[in-house]
Image (tube, rainbow, N blue to C red):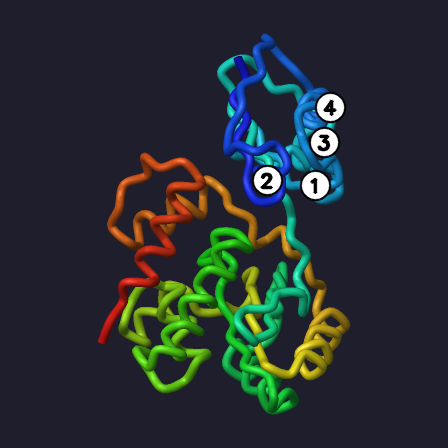
Amino acid sequence: MIAIRLLGGAKKAVGKPAVDLDRPSASIAEILQFLTGISTDSRSLQPNNLIIAVNGIDSAALQGQQTVAKSGDTVTIVTVVHGGADYNLDGNHASIIGIPKIAEDPGKLVDRLRAGNKDVSIQAASADAVYGMDHALGVLRIALEAEKRKIMLVNRGETELLLRLACTGQITEAIRRAGLKQGAAGCFIAFSKDSEALRRFFDQAKNEFEANDSVLAPSREKRARLAELLGMGTKFDDGEFLKYLLERAAILVK
């Protein structure tokens, strides 16, 4: 029996967070064929839109679609939501972009981007602090709702976002936990009521950086790191862990 966990669009396409494949072994290509046969939206299961891990190891680092999973293995399939000004959150447009390596000094980089995009709120974070695109979007929704209800922890929306992403009310601790780091993978989370201004930022970021949203995908290593930072156990599946992170982000008060 091969356990298959599904996240994001793959979960929606199949209609459940997990399925079992009753076979002693199967290649990734065969597993995708099986899932396509029981899905309602085969487009969400196109290989180029997926990150597929076998026991926490990206299959792209193994034998790709020819990687073989055996009985007792867990195959995790994540739909990659490509970043961009594609999200409309209660009147705000949002863009989330993964960057494999930050070459500049993080503080100077963010200051430069903000100075050149006055109509866009921009926050940057370590990719290790983002447990998938749904995590980043969920925390942004919480931060925007806090602003709307006038219960923000701080005065700036960008800082509010970082605090809630890091699940702490202390700015110094938020930077330690989730701040952008030079030489490591990062993430830009940008939002604005002006969709054209956000699109210009998105185009600038795509042209200036080697963007790759796969650095934002959930992983066993990320879950272990975040669980340790937050002082929690690791006996959660991916969906439960994401729900817990968003609950921790939402309950922060002054």
Q: Is residue 81 left or right of residue 221?
A: right
Could you tell which of marks 1 and 3 lies nearer the N-terminus? 1
Residue type at mark 4: give it.
Gln
Q: How far apart are marks 1 and 3 (CA)?
A: 18 Å
Q: Are marks 2 and 1 in contact (CB under 8 Å)?
A: yes
Report the front residue among 101 and 198. Answer: 198
Q: Mark 3 points at which residue?
A: 64
Q: What residue type is labelled 2?
A: Lys
Question: Identity of the amino acid at label 1?
Answer: Ser
Residue on which disc 2 sits? 12
Q: 10 Å neighbourhood of mark 4: few (<14), some, or many (≥20)? A: few
In percent of width and height, residue 181 lies at 49, 68
Pointer 2 and pointer 3: residues touching (CB < 8 Å)?
Answer: no
The residue that disc 1 covers is: 44
Give the image location of residue 8, x and y in percent: 57, 45
Label 2 with label 4: CB-CB less than 8 Å:
no
Left/right placement of residue 169 relative to residue 200 reads left
In the shown orientation, is residue 210 left or right of residue 11?
A: right
Tell me the tag on residue 33: 4
Element assignment for label 2: helix
**Picture residue at 67% right of the left edge, 78% below the top:** 195
Q: Earlier in the sequence, mark 2 or mark 4?
A: 2
Image position of 9 with respect to 166: above or below: above
